[in-house]
Amino acid sequence: MVGDIRRKDVCDLIERYEPDIVLIQETALKEHQATHDVLPGYTTYHDFCPQATRAGKGVAIAIKINNGIPLGVLSNIVVGSKFCKGTAGRFISADLTLPAKSGKRQAIELTSFHVPQMGNQTERVPMLESLETHLQAGDPINSPDRAGIVRIAAGDGNGVYAREEVTYADSTKLRTKLSVGT
């Protein structure tokens, strides 16, 4: 994470609340720093940024380890640097398969993302398009084999969207919910 103070704050929150899964944005880790053991007690998967000095780059999924055993197994890992130009360090998604208590395994799709701020349209537009494409592709309506998979997406959307970015819904209804800009 950026700076020791910020890393300490994150570690303090994790220690206090002991979440099973942590989705992190803006890690600003370089490749050699983006290790699986960057957070104590968790196995961490990253999409790091080649230019980690830039703000907003780097996302991660951290899975809790209990008695040396991870909570579950990650598969189908997709990172922004391999997904689409302009999304390096801004997107990671994976399926977490949990151990079966009743004999049936439970899968959870986890997505951590960071959308660039408004002034950065060369990266913002491809990121929004890629995120929407990814989320639509995993929708059970478009992919029946994904039915029954719990889907969790968390991230920093940098909340104010330009009117042309809101193509999937009636922007007049979203205006009050998302403070849609012009």
Image (cartoon, grey):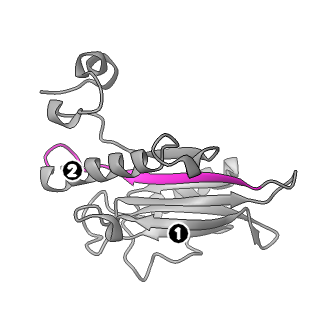
- Residue 124 is marked as 2
- In reply to whether residue 112 is colored magenta, the answer given is yes
Taking the spot 68% from the left edge, 47% from the top edge, the residue there is 17
Q: Which quadrant holds residue 26?
A: bottom left
Q: Quadrant of the N terminus?
A: bottom left
Q: How many marks?
A: 2
Q: Quadrant of the C terminus?
A: top left
Question: Which residues make up the magenta segment?
Answer: 105-119
12 left or right of 169 in image: right
- Characterize the magenta stretch by its predominant secondary structure: strand
Above-or-below relation of 20 to 152? below
- Report x, y in % for residue 135: 42, 47
Instruction: From the viewer's side, name the closer residue of 179 and 142.
Output: 142
Instruction: Let me know if residue 48 appears in the view.
Output: yes
- In reply to whether residue 74 is colored magenta, the answer given is no
77 left or right of 159 in image: right
Instruction: From the viewer's side, name the closer residue of 109 and 4.
Output: 109
According to the picture, the residue beneath numbered tag 1 turns out to be 45
Secondary structure beneath label 1: strand
- Report x, y in % for residue 112: 46, 53
- Report x, y in % for residue 181: 17, 27
Check disc 1 and give the amino acid type: Tyr
Check disc 2 and give the amino acid type: Arg
Would you call the spot at circle 1 few (<14 residues within 10 Å), some (14-19), or many (20 or more)? Answer: many
Secondary structure beneath label 2: helix
Instruction: Let me know if residue 39 appears in the view.
Output: no
Taking the spot 45% from the left edge, 58% from the top edge, the residue there is 6
Taking the spot 34% from the left edge, 71% from the top edge, the residue there is 82
